[in-house]
Image (tube, helix red, strand yellow):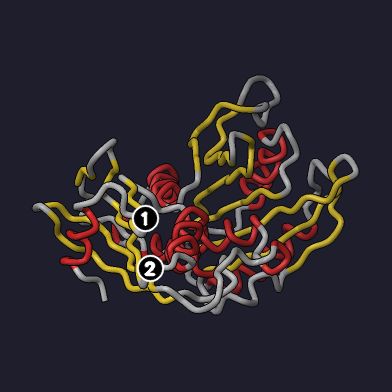
Amino acid sequence: MVDTNEILQLLQSPDSKNLICRKLEFRPRNLAMFIAALSNLPEEYGYILIGVKKETDKYCIHGISPEFKISESINRALDLLSEQPLIDFERVTIEGNNIFAIKVKKVPISVFFKPAHLLQSQPELFIRDLYLACIKLQSRKLYVDATEDERNDFITDLLETNGYHLKDQTRRGSSAAGKSSGEVDIFINKNGMPFTIIEALNLDSLNTNYLNTHLNKIYSYDTTGNAFNICLSYVKVKDFGSFWDRYCAHVKGHEYPVMLISSDTSADNDYGYSDIRFMTTTHNRSGKLTHLYHMCVKIQGV
């Protein structure tokens, strides 16, 4: 278990080899690297402290917000490792400040990152994070009658918390009329490069003309040819099952700006929820296959 006295003792020495401090860190890959490093040290245990920064000859306690949540990032970090290390984590108070402590215990076998072929692909990881954000959106009554922008802001905040670099309403590409730059709902960068685009819309019925406009806008905004993009629909209808069937039939028959190769309505089989659904369409863009994820989220209140 996390022991405050152990933490205080480690903080007394700026040369502690089994102590890693970060003012703020929630990126799973970095957390996995820290956990693996401490697992492989000769000491019996080590700590990762979030909300603490190492200065030249001392540690400074900055603290973190009581709202700071890191459990999902830790779980994702553990998924990246070849072995499951022994860890405990909890929020503790040091010098009147809240910090987050992860205790990592020594294990008899070396811990490394999993081989790349055993890890989920970047699109799969992002879709999982977006799916989780949509679950949280559904549970908030505040967003039952919200605008598209308000819902997008909520999704954007959650994705940023998971370490993604986002820009919303970014002027990019051409508009639907082809006259000037349009506004991308959510544009995600990764390592300074375009990663994916989320085009979002509110639907209270299967308004095919409105949906078609948004589907086509994705390809106007995506000027580089991303490996995948997302059409995210916030749906407020009584019969979501019937809506989803008709949505799938429509997007499989839609004439996209790039060639449609195939569709997969079973893409969400690993997700057991009935009121968030997604499927994929695969396209040939300049000789390369790209994917469009169609995600529909039922908004309660009808």
The residue identified by callout 1 is: 17
Which of 175 and 126 lies nearest the eye of the viewer?
A: 126
* Marker count (numbered): 2
Asked if marks 1 and 2 touch (Cβ < 8 Å), the reply is: yes
Under mark 2, the amino acid is Glu
Which of 195 and 60 lies nearest the eye of the viewer?
A: 60
Residue 166 rendering spot, x and y as whole percentages:
49, 40
Residue 297 left/right relative to 20: right
Residue at x 36%, y 59% (from the top left corner): 18
Q: Is residue 204 visible?
A: no
Q: Residues within 10 Å of mark 2 (few under 14, many from 20)?
A: few
Establish if 178 lies above or below 89: above
Residue 245 left/right relative to 204: right
Establish if 142 lies above or below 278: above
Residue 172 left/right relative to 158: right
Where residue 206 sits, quadrant-wise, is bottom right
Under mark 1, the amino acid is Lys
| Mark carried by residue 48 | none
Q: Is disc 1 placed on a helix, strand or loop? A: loop
Residue at x 62%, y 68% (from the top left corner): 244
Query: How far is the residue under mark 1 from the one under mark 2?
Result: 9 Å
Which of 254 and 265 lies nearest the eye of the viewer?
A: 265
Residue 82 rendering spot, x and y as whole percentages:
59, 71
Establish if 260 lies above or below 285: below
Instruction: Specify the quadrant that holds the N terminus.
Output: bottom left
Residue at x 71%, y 43% (from the top left corner): 226
Q: Is disc 2 placed on a helix, strand or loop? A: loop
The residue identified by callout 2 is: 43
Which of 125 and 136 lies nearest the eye of the viewer?
A: 125
